[in-house]
Structure formats: C-alpha cells, structure tokens
Image (spheres, rainbow, N blue to C red):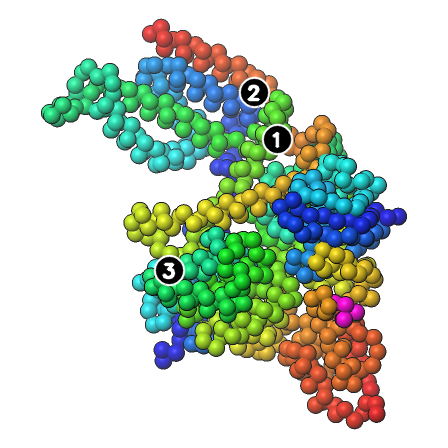
Amino acid sequence: MTKAILSSYIKKNTFIHKLNPLTKLIFLVAVIITVFAVKSFIYNLIIVLAIIPLAYSAKLLSKVFKPLRYLFIIFIVLYGIQSFLYPEKETILIDFGYGIAIWEEGVLFATIISLRLLAMIVHGYFFVLVTHPGDLVCSLRKIKFPYKFGYIVLSTLQVIPRVASQMETIIDAQKSRGLETKGSIANRLKAYSPLLGPLFLGSVQNVVERTIALESRAFSYETEKTSYRETYVRKKDKIIMASIVVFFTLYGVISWIL
Amino acid sequence: MDIVKFKNYSWKYSETDKYVLKNINLTIQQGEFLGIIGNVGSGRSTLCMSLLGLVPHLFYGKTKGELIVDDIVVKKAKISDLSSRVGLVLQSPDTQLTGAGTNVEEELAFGLENLGVPRREIIKKVDSMLKLLNLEQLRNRSPFELSGGQQQKVAIASVFIMEPKILVLDEPTAQLDPLGTEQVFSFIKKLAKKGTTIILNTQKIDYIAEFADRIAVVNKGRVVKVGETREILTNVELLRRNGISPTVFTKLSEELIKNRLYKGELAMTFGDAVKIMKKVKRK
Amino acid sequence: MSENVIEIKNLSFTYPAGVEALKDINLEIKKGEIVAIIGQNGSGKTTLVKHFNGLLQPTSGTVIINGKDAKQSTTAQLSREVGYVFQDPDDQLFMSKVKDEIAFGPKNLKMKKNEVNKRVRDTLKLVKLWKFRNTHPLDLNLDDKKLIAIASIIAMNPHVIILDEPTSGQDHRGILRAESLIKKLSKEHTIIIISHDMDLVSKIAQRVIVMYNSKILMTGTPKEVFIKTSLLAKTHLKPPLITQLSQKTKGMRSDILSIDEFIEELKTKKPHSSKSR
C-alpha cells in the first residue's frame, strides 16, 4: 500500500514554486560552492539560516527541516570523533586526564563540516520540495542535457517506492515461513540475506519488462524528440539568475577579505 | 493484405538447447483480430515478442526461417524501426508503465515525444485519446496510484496513441480482478473497431470467444492450428489434445447432446447457450 | 466452543498513510472449514488475511487464533498454526534449490534434521515435484512455482492454510492440479482461499465471504451467495458463467453451480420421454 511518491515535491502556488527549475538549480549550486569556499563559520551559518525566509515565502517552513532527524546521528559521530581525535590539536577545551581530552580545533572543525552538511541538506531538500521533477527534466532537456539521463532521473524517482513495497512483501513471506525478524542484530541480518535473491531476480525481471515497455514506446527511435511538458525561462528568471551569481561571488569575496 | 508473415520460423534462446518456436507458418491479415491460445510454456509470449523484434534483437539466440512484419524483415531491422508500427503490452501493469510520465497525460505523450511528434499535435492526440477511452478523470493522476485495471488501460492507451498498425497484447488481464478484466476487454473491443490489427494472447477463452476473428492454437512451440474462432473453439478434440479447456458453454452443450436433451451445433458463447436452452425447453 | 480456529471481533484497520482498509469486521472460521474470500482488488481481502498470521495488527478489535490473542505472538510464532501462501511465487521463493526452499520453514521451526528431510520428501512427493528437488525454484514454470510455494507451507504443517489466488495465471492443467491439491489438503487443514476464480470458489468452498469497501458484504454457501445477483453486482462480481446461464433460463433454479447439476435439473424437471426415440 505504498503510495507512489513522486519525489517529495509539494505543490504550492508561490513565487518560488513558479520560478524555472534552472533558476532554483543555480541557486542550489551557488549555495554548495559558497559553503565550501567560505571558511568562516559565521558566513556559513548565515547561509544555513537563509533557508528560513525562503521556506517561509514558499509556505514550507514546517517541512524543510524534516531530514534533520536522520542527520542527528551523523552530527553526534562527527563531533564525537573530531573533538577527541582531530590531528592538529593545540588547545585543550576539557581535559579528562589519561591523555583523553576535547580539543578546541576539533570542535571548530566539526562545526564547519556540520554547517556545510547542514546547508547542503537543507537547501537541497528545499530544492526538491519546490521543484516538480517533470519540470526539472524538461528544462534540463532544453539546455541539451541527454534525453536518457532525464528518463533515468524521473523513472528512478517513481520506481523506488515500488522496490520498497516489493521488499516488504518478501519480508512478509519470510516471516510467514517462520523466520524471526525481531530480536538480535544477528537474527535480523540472517533475515535479510535471503531477501536479496528474489529482490534482485525480481528487479532484473522488472527491468527486462520495462525495457520492453520502453521499446514499445519507440524509446530508441532515432529522431529529434519533442516534449509535451513545457517550461519557460522568463525575464524574472534571468534577472534572478544573474543576481544569484553576482551576490554569491561578492559574498565569497567579502568572507575572504573580512 | 498480409501484415504479418511467419515463414518456417524457428527461434531458440542462446542459453537453452530446445527451440521455443518451431517451424511456424502463420499469416495475419491487416485489420483482423487474432487470438492466441495454448498452455503455460507453449511459446505464446515468445511469439508475441518476436513481432516487435525483441526476439532476436533484445534477447540473444538463433532464428531460422523468416518473419516479415509490415513489409519489414524483422531479422534485418532494428527494434526502433518496428516500434512505430507494432505496439506491445505485457501482463504486469506495473512494469508496462514507463515511469517517464509524472501523470497519465504525460505517460500517454511519451511515445509520441519519442517519435518526434510536434507538441501541438501531441496535445491534440492526448486529449482525444483521453476522451475516446473515458480516461479524462484520470489525466492528472500519477499512473502508479491507479488500480491495476486502470494502469493496464493507461498502458494500452499509451501504445495505441502511437497509432501502431499492429497491437500485440500478451496476457493483458492475467493480473487483474474481474472488474479490471472486464474493463480491459471492453477497451480492447473498442480499439478493434478502429481497424487496428490486434493480436491477443490470453488464457481467458470465454472472452476471446466473444470477439476474435480467428484463433491460433499453440502447443510446444508450434502453431498447431489456425482457423475461424468458432471452428477452433467448438473443435473440442483439438482443444483437449492441446491441454485447453473448451468454454463452459461448449462443455454444457456437449453434455446436453450426450444426454439427448439437444441435437445440433455446439455452443461457444453465452449467447449461443441462451439460444440452445430455448430449444431444449421447447421440445 | 473452541471449535473456532479464527475469531475476529470488531476488527478495524487503518494503514499508516490513513487509508481505512477494514471496518468493523466480525468473523468466525471453524476448524476444518473451507472458506473463500472474494471481492475486487482493494476491497480488503488481503489486509484481512494478513491479520490471521500477525503480519498486521488491528487498529482496534481483536483477532483470536486457536484461542489465543494474535497480539501475543510474532508472525514467526504464528506460522506454526497459520500458513500463508502469497499470490506471486516470485516474492516467496528465495533459496537456490527446491529442496532447500521446502526446508526453509521446517528449519525455522527448529525441527531436527531427520524430520526436516522427511518433510521435504513427503511434501515434494505429495505435490509430485520430487524430480525437481535440485532445480532452482525460479527456473520452474509458473504452474510449478505456484505449487512449490504451497508445498513450502505444507511442509510446516500449519493447521490453517491461506492461499492467495492459487489459480491465477495458470492454464487448464495447472488449475486442475491446484484444485485437487486443495481438496486433498482440506481433509486435514482449515483452508482459506482468496480468489477471483468463481468456478474454483463454487467447486471448493463451503462458505463464501464477500468483501466490499473494507467490509464484509455477505457470507453464505456458494449457492446462497451466487443467487444474490444484485448484491454481487454492487461489487462488480458475477456468479460463475453456468450459474448466470441458469439464472437467464426460464423455469430453471437460479443456484446451479456445475454442468452436472444443470443437466440433472433438466432431467428431473422434464423426464426424458418427450425427446426422441
């Protein structure tokens, strides 16, 4: 009963939603480049926090922080390891004795990495929330991105939930044959290993069938393909694209100077 | 006009020794509705796949003899040459949707995009196809959210919109519930009326009895017999020899004759049986 | 009193996504019964039977299996009592040899090696597929794969066997084979079948449960159910074709389920004398 999830796109009628996907993509790329170029963590923090007004104007403020739940563990591990073991340690923050201590450089390093990660995840997820995958593929095709690449992106998004639900069925079948999936980790690993067979063979079979479906729709027919879906690069898109480039360049430069 | 010609055609997959199709001779007329019946493992699906050139161009193996589809020699052609002429739909609705469309109208448009049809024309065709097949209320739904029957209708419509000369349907209802089965068959009936050549492979003899023009019986890789639907489906000996059960109405009329309650032709469809019962009553 | 192997009281179930798949189901299945559950896809059949072996737990209401609340046990524990054969064999065959496939369940039940081997042999001989014991299950044709899926449950010897669409996609011979196997099994097991195949249902079931819109619409013997044509029509179900014919023929009983019965009815109604000779 898995619902077909078409990525995580949420339809809303806002200014950001209506922008061309390429505009939003350029923004995302600019954010990612900048957080890596900028070394000061204040500047990165500003970029992370910039998501708040953006998400607010797209009416998605409550949704945009959802993936952070899954990141929590990564942050803990990151801080855990770096605070104790960062190689260029000089300043002790807390000393536990026996040569074990938390080092300031390690904490700083972990913070910078975390902020980069945070910026990428939050802005990346925001991009997915406000961009219809069909529009994205369509506009990528317009700037001569390979056609097949577009298909792979779109179909993968739609096929993943199917694989997940098939996996569920196979696990159910195994439980029904007396396999205990609760309990120790060893038990669970044992439970999941026979899963791979049918899942793999099943997906091979599905790939063959879907290939046939594609051939039947003239996928390999050699001609200039046309597009049913239409996206436009409007004047406001061009203005915004240019502003993004100018703004982030300046931002980067300023962060280096100051 | 003959649109499909199998001439002494044989095929084996490279990983097996046995031929899956053996010395097939079969011609199919343009505009006809041909039913294919036979057992599990008789080679019916392979026969269907050979029409789009998947055999021998997607699967590896060996062919003998010749297959000509719409004047194209399949062995020498590419799948893409055939795909604008032959539409093929398999049984699992899930894999028959390409995933290229985020909603039903885009799924329908996909084949036309591949053929390079101008956008304006695609819009027109999608609209009229949705109207023709009563799919309008589904146009903005994701194909993957639909019921099996609806999905299969969308899959068939997506192939049909490309206006193939030949529509090949391989067990299109095998995974559907009674409602879905009925919907898909009445849908196919509608398409048949538009003059497309239809080749339908199915186990559902009751349905095929209602609307195929001719039937080919396939067993162990051979086309055992081809003939008019009534001629084949009332030939109970032929059917049984090939492991196929006649329709319940044929079996009933056999029993009526055996019990001397009725004399005459064997029944094939529900309509036949209703007529016969009137005779039985009157005497 | 404890004749019931399955007792369902006020069972409702809502999927996490919010779809209400079962509404207030009350049902008792007796030991040794052969029950068929029919209805369109999405009517709740599969969701219902998944409660019988604990794959799903009720949102509200209770499911009692052999006198015990199903909540108390895991699916693996319940598998001793309730065996569930899924519709698609490809989803439930995971070993590389048929004999290992059959042994999978008995091994999970911690049976001794001798016992496991005996079960494998007995079951494969029962379904007449012993010759395939060393074959890869997925190399078999559909009919045989379906039988192997059933056999892998039989080997665990659960009291209740649930079969989801045992005849779908099969040819005439496969259907006959499945039918006779189910009949054989019904001597020692309680059988629950989910099926769209009305001929199978009319031939095999003692009781039919019709589901519609997440509820039980009616239950009864095949004869009782298949004469309620207007109620069936609501669910887009139709009686077997032979029954439809009897209903269309004037002066005929409307609950005829087989050709033999049809002929019998004609003979008794109107003695043979009026015809030739």
Query: Of the numbered discs in the image, which one, if any, rests on residue C107?
Result: 3
Name the amino acid, label 1: Lys
Q: Secondary structure at mark 2?
A: helix
Query: Of the numbered discs in the image, which one, if any, rests on residue A237?
Result: 2
Residue at point 33% right, 25% down?
A114
Residue at which label 1 appears: A148
Residue A86: x and y in percent read 25, 20
Q: Secondary structure at mark 3?
A: helix
Q: Is residue B54 left or right of residue B214?
A: left
Name the amino acid, label 2: Asp
Total number of numbered discs in the rendering: 3
- In this rendering, the label closer to the viewer, 3 or 1: 3
Q: Secondary structure at mark 1?
A: helix
Subunit of label 3: C
Subunit of label 2: A
Residue at point 80% right, 45% down?
B66
